[in-house]
Amino acid sequence: MKLELCHEIMACLPQGRTIFRYGKDHYAFYLLRRAAAGGTTVARLRHSGLGCLLEKPLVRAWLAGLGSGIIRAGDVPEPEWLADGEIYRLSLGTWGEDIDEWKRNQVSRRGASLVLHLNHNKRQHERLQEISQKTGGDPFTSCGHPEVGGNHPTLAWARLDVDLDRGEALIEELQSDRIRYVDWVVKRALRTQPKDTFYYYGAELKPEVVFNYWEQEMKRHAAIWDEAILTAALHFLQHELGIKKVFYHTFESGSVLKHISKKKPPRSIYTSLPKRFCFAETEEIPRMFAECPSWQNRPRRQKREVKFQVLVV
């Protein structure tokens, strides 16, 4: 997408902090609320593409207390008000300002990406400072990726390609360097004697401090970060931009169209995760590619073999 459109979207949205609350499997209620916007029934939901959501324990508990008849959006719990949610902050940014470097930036067509950040809140940052005060900085930040940093460091992000004219968007990437870095440090700490220290990118770390940070803070985020950022992205696209059709790369299409030949991302991000969210594989190509030279110039065989996943929210 054009960098100018990214900046235009960012300028039109409310400024300041945006709170987002998320807990395990809350995405099911988000999707069901959308499906029930015009009224539906349990039978219709069960035979729809969202039927698998009804088997989630928290959804089954809700259904047990629900009377028969029409289900409307107001009958479905609002995920942001569920008591077991973690509180995050959302922010927007861009990635790929130099359009000549679009292949290196791993975007599917020439241009930039709009980035939605899922950031730590104040409490999470205070716990991070237990490590930062001993190292002189945040050892888990990634300067080469679209992160916010500062007092609300980024936990995960979604790179988005948006076409407002056609009412569609493509999820280019979901990623969390921070979870991966912390996980590596925990494994390194397990191989270190309790009273010893070890170094991570110049930071001197103690095993006890690392274990405390993992157990008290990061462990629960590691269990939900992928669901949280995908739910936040879908909510942002629908609620803020009015996008109803959302495409998502398959593992194969992402590798090919983003020119990734080495260090490929975890396959589960492009397989089991979208499946849980009821994305369906499709041979339909996002219309934003229709007049895109970077797509038209690809070999015909490659275009035939590339498939996407799609969800209409």
Image (cartoon, helix red, strand yellow):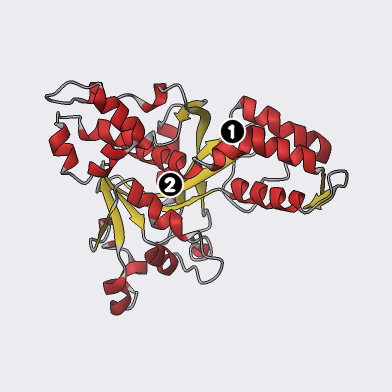
Disc 1: CA contacts within 10 A as few (<14), some (14-19) or many (>=20): many
User: Residue 164: x and y, percent?
Assistant: 30, 44
Instruction: Tell me the residue at 37%/68% (across/down).
Output: 294
Residue 99 sits above or below residue 77 on the image: below
37 sits to left or right of 146 = left
Q: Earlier in the sequence, mark 1 or mark 2?
A: 2
Look at mark 2 in the image and give the residue it sits on. Answer: 4
Kindly state the secondary structure of the residue where label 2 is placed: helix
Q: Nearer the viewer, mark 1 or mark 2?
A: 1
Which quarter shows the C terminus?
Answer: top left
Look at mark 1 in the image and give the residue it sits on. Answer: 120
Query: Could you say which quadrant of the image residue 292 lies in?
Result: bottom left
Total numbered labels: 2
Kindly state the secondary structure of the residue where label 1 is placed: loop
Residue 156 sits above or below residue 2 on the image: above
User: Residue 99: x and y, percent?
Assistant: 49, 59
Instruction: Tell me the residue at 52%/63% (across/down).
Output: 101
114 sits to left or right of 191 = left
16 sits to left or right of 2 = right
What amino acid type should be assigned to the residue bearing mark 2?
Glu
Instruction: Tell me the residue at 14%/28% (across/down).
Output: 39
Q: Who is closer to the viewer here, 245 or 3?
A: 245
Q: CA distance from mark 1 to mark 2?
A: 28 Å
User: Residue 283: x and y, percent?
Assistant: 23, 64
